[in-house]
Image (cartoon, rainbow, N blue to C red):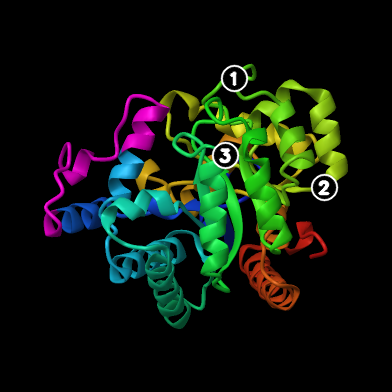
Amino acid sequence: MLFRSKGVSDDYLRRIPKAELHCHLAGTLRAKTVAELAQRYAIPLPRPAETLYQWPNFDGFLEILRLTASVLRTPGDFARAVYEYVEDAVRDGNLRHVEFFFNPDYFYPNGIDYPSMVAGMAEGVEQARKSFGVSCLLICCIDRSINNGAQAVAIVETALAHRHELVVGIGLDGNESVGPPALYAEAYALARKAGLKCTAHCCEDYLTPLEAPPTNYLICRDVLKCDRIDHGYNMLASEYVLAEARRDGLYFTPCAWTSLVHNRPHRPRRIRGLVEAGLNVTINTDDPAMFQTNLGHGFTTLFETIGWGPDMARKFSLNSVEGSWLDESAKAALRIEFRRQIAALDKEFGYEATALKV
């Protein structure tokens, strides 16, 4: 058995239980599934499936993301997307819970309405639960690259008019420099009033700290009143903002891999910075199929680079439970299951002596 520098094996990292809190449904589609559905619906692809997931920059990535979204046209397509992601994530990283982002505006041009797409995802969630015992929740997302404030309000109004028990929150993604968080204050106020949870992509590192400044965190906290924050890397440019975030105690959902190849060597160091700043950090995949990654790969890559031991693996595993939007009963049950699995893994790998009290 091969061990990393601080005594944690790749197999342990892959098998430790995980909840995925930052995952975009449109970015989970297997390239072969995209090609198959594109052929069914006569949608031209720019290149073969083997090289489909390539792009020169972040905006190029967003173009391919929206292209993959265009192949989801029926409830059955949505069910298939959910099921295939869970199937892959269970195999590659012992996924036990996932909270999917979905952008309704990506799918309306496909001829499907909001209730139908959510019904399809719900069908996939139930199929995945029966096959793998994995729980799933949904987050209705606003793309700031294409949605202004009024359009964001309309998205939330639609979600509320067709309320579904699995849709527990709203999110904000897309190009952060195009849509500063304060533009979406009205949409977030509407969602909060209706009891939805709130998160937002914030301080992303494909932009500079001037383009996606650390102060965006303060706006997400004070104006949008977010319950959770996605990414957060550029906060490292401000000790004041880091201190505020540490005091606030929100959970952060950075991703170990990224859409931009030139950024990949830097991402582990930035995640380490968030951890060392005392923030509540979870590890996620973002768009796993598109980035050619998975939960197991994210953990092993991150731990190989930083040299963390099993104590940090346990912390990330349990943080993903605590940061989830499950109700308290479901969260308590998941917490017990994670602790049981972690204890069994510690015994199998001989890590009991270093185990945290979990």
Q: Residue at x 61, y 68 (%)?
A: 348
Q: Residue at x 71, y 50 (%)?
A: 189
Give SS at disc 3: helix
What amino acid type is highlighted by mark number 2?
Gly
Q: Is residue 220 left or right of residue 127?
A: right
Q: Nearer the viewer, mark 3 or mark 2?
A: 3
Instruction: Check if residue 205 falls in the magenta segment.
Output: no
Q: Residue 230 in the image: x percent, y percent?
A: 62, 43
Query: In the displayed structure, would residue 355 be above or below residue 166?
Result: above
> Disc 1 and disc 2: Cα gap in Å?
25 Å
Q: Quadrant of residue 111?
A: bottom left
Q: Which mark is residue 149?
A: 3
Q: Residue at x 63, y 29 (%)?
A: 269
Q: Is residue 353 visible?
A: yes
Q: Is residue 15 visible?
A: no
Q: Earlier in the sequence, mark 3 or mark 2?
A: 3
| Residue on which disc 2 sits | 249
Query: In the displayed structure, would residue 280 be above or below residue 125?
Result: above
Instruction: Tell me which segment is drawn in magenta.
Output: 39-63
Q: Earlier in the sequence, mark 1 or mark 2?
A: 1
Q: Nearer the viewer, mark 1 or mark 2?
A: 1
Q: Earlier in the sequence, mark 1 or mark 3?
A: 3
Q: Which mark is residue 211?
A: 1
Q: Residue 292 in the image: x percent, y percent?
A: 37, 44
Q: Is the residue under label 2 in contact with that under label 1 (CB below 8 Å)?
A: no
Give SS at disc 2: loop
What amino acid type is highlighted by mark number 3?
Gly
Q: Is residue 45 left or right of residue 168?
A: left
Q: Residues within 10 Å of mark 3 (few under 14, many from 20)?
A: some
